[in-house]
Image (cartoon, helix red, strand yellow):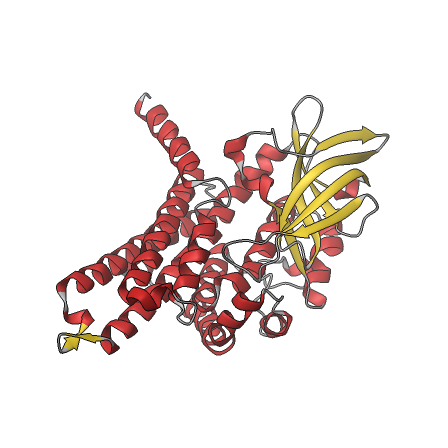
Amino acid sequence: MSEFNLSEEQKEFQKLARDFSVRELAPKAAHFDESGAVPLDVLGKAFESGLTNVMAPESAGGLALPFFEAALIQEELAVGCNAIAGYVEASAIAILPLIFENDSEKTKKFIQPLLEKLAFAGFAESMLDTTSGADNLPIAKKAGEDFELTGNVRVVAGDQCDWFALMAKDASGAASIFVVDKKAAGVKQGKTVNRLGRKCLGTVDFELSAVKLSPQYLIGTSGGAAEIMAFVLPRAYLLFAASAIGISRSALTHSISYAKERKTFGKPIGDHQAVAFMMSDMAKDIEAAKLLTYKSCQLVDQGENDFETAAQAKVFAQEAAMRIATDAVQIYGGYGYSREYPVEKLMRDAKTYQITGGTSQKQLAEIGRKALAHAAL
């Protein structure tokens, strides 16, 4: 990928994340998947290594890394364990609206505490699902100078977040972005969702009952969600794409290792054409996903909030991850279906991305509509 030669600084961040992933995440992935426990010790080490909230502005004491570097880090962490890396992913998405607004007081209030100790932010799933419209959003009512939020949200990393970002609509249907303190009056934490994959990434249901928020908790302007989300969505999609690539890379690595060790008819199964072709397809799809994702990361760092290309990268990477993880299970045969081996976890984790931020089918329909609109010009 000569057109995407990384700078020395980018390679250093990539290596830092890769070494940490190999040392701390991969050996513990099965344990936290089986137990569903929050990996606080591992996350604490990630925090100490400077791998959390890497896009936080310098005014808050952060590194203010370009988005491409953040995506490279996310990809490497996801290779080790996508679920543990999900806390880093969720917090990065949650702070994006604040990065866009660039308000110094809000930056210090909400982002700076995430850099002073092990802490994360979360985001409501409905904030990113633009394909469902405003039907599933909480209601925001004016209460003097304040706002009152009522409704239900499902929050990624809700079990460990200090606060979460969400989108709410007013009576006219206009949408706004808010920060909600998890401990605010009227916020009731419900059950942790028992999901198929990403078991240790606590996704939690919250009920909001007339939660009163001062104007400081509104990001941007009232009714101004569209402008903010034009900045947030491409970056969120690309973080998802980077994580999906991490799953695919892990699946291919495990497949190659097993194909060299497992023998049938007197030779490694990797020498059989059918298996070799499966791994060849894995490798080419990973390369294609990287090219599309890295190109999109470059575009957003150049200030082009290219929703269409980012959505294409997300859909391609997540669909590839599902195929690749499923093929990895197939290569392992009966062992692949057993929890004693790592690939069935990868298959369950990969499924998450075909749903998060809007299903693949909904996003493909949206990409198709945009393509038709361009063709008509």
- Quarter of the rendering occupied by the C terminus: top left
> Is 118 or 100 nearer to us in this picture?
118
- Whether residue 246 is visible here, answered yes or no, is no
Q: Is residue 364 above or below residue 98?
A: above
Q: Does 76 sit left or right of 5 as displayed?
A: right
> Is 133 or 297 nearer to us in this picture?
133
Q: Does 323 sit left or right of 27 as displayed?
A: left
Residue drawn at (53%, 38%) of the image = 129
Residue drawn at (49%, 40%) of the image = 358
Residue drawn at (36%, 24%) of the image = 373
Query: Horizontal and vertical percent for residue 185?
Result: 84, 46
Q: Does 367 sit left or right of 66 as displayed?
A: left
Query: Horizontal and vertical percent for residue 228?
Result: 59, 39
Residue drawn at (44%, 63%) of the image = 345
> Is 120 or 15 nearer to us in this picture?
120
- Quarter of the rendering occupied by the N terminus: bottom left
Q: What is the residue that sits farthest to the right in this orientation?
A: 144
Query: Horizontal and vertical percent for residue 120?
Result: 66, 59
Q: Does 8 sit left or right of 218 as displayed?
A: left
Q: How many labels does the image show?
A: 0
> Is 5 or 28 nearer to us in this picture?
28
Instruction: Examine the image and state in which quarter residue 341 appears.
Output: bottom left
- Whether residue 149 is visible here, answered yes or no, is yes
